[in-house]
Amino acid sequence: MSKIYAGSAQHVPAGSTKIVAPSAGKLWAILAASSNNSVSDTIVLYDNTTASVPLLFQVMISAQNSPWQVIFPAYRPLTFATGLTIVSPATANCIVIVEY
């Protein structure tokens, strides 16, 4: 049975690495907010239960384009085969909605 995370379980604090899903599943949305005005921050998502290859998704955000979001359509979520790990930079908080 699938489990959809809600509330604080989907929050990835700034400056952290978090396993969001421990097995295969779907990413429905990612939202991020940056407080860094001087440089861009990179948010990295891995199709793994650790912060290592394969790289699934990577995006650079800054305060100028914050808050930033991607909402995948119902017919094309971003799928991952092993698990989902997110690395959030020191100045960017993330929220993700996953199903696994």
Image (cartoon, helix red, strand yellow):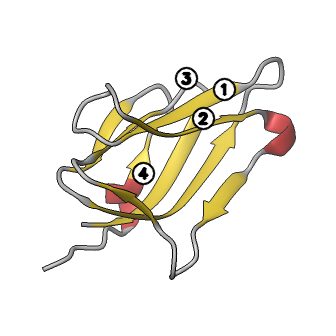
| Residue type, mark 4 in image | His
- Tell me the kind of residue under disc 3: Ala
Give x and y (percent) for residue 32: 62, 47
Q: Mark 1 points at which residue?
A: 41
Q: Which circle, 4 or 1, is nearer the viewer?
A: 1
Q: Position of residue 97 (x, y in %)?
A: 43, 64
Q: How far apart are marks 2 and 1 (CA)?
A: 7 Å
Residue labelled with disc 4: 11
For the residue labelled by badge 2, is the local secondary structure a helix, a strand or a loop? strand
* Gap between marks 3 and 1 measured at Cα: 8 Å
Residues packed near mark 4 inside 10 Å, few (<14), some (14 to 19) or many (20 plus)? some
What crowding class fits label 1: few (fewer than 14 Cα within 10 Å), some (14-19), or many (20 or more)?
A: many
Front position in the image: 25 or 36: 25
| Residue under label 2 | 92
Cα distance between the residues tagged 4 and 2: 11 Å
Helix, strand or loop status at disc 1: strand
The residue lying at 40 percent from left, 28 percent from top is: 16
Residue 67 or residue 1, whichever sits in front:
1
**Where 14 falls versus 39 (above or below)?**
below
* Marks 4 and 1, how far apart at CA: 17 Å
Whichever of labels 4 and 1 marks the residue nearer the N terminus, that label is: 4
Quick one: 75 or 94, which is closer to the camera? Answer: 75
Residue 1: where, in percent of width, then height?
12, 80
> What residue does disc 3 label?
90
**Residue 71, relative to residue 17: is it above or below?**
below
Say what amino acid the circle numbered 2 marks: Ala
Q: Looking at the image, do the residues carrying marks 2 and 1 touch, with CB atoms under 8 Å apart? A: yes
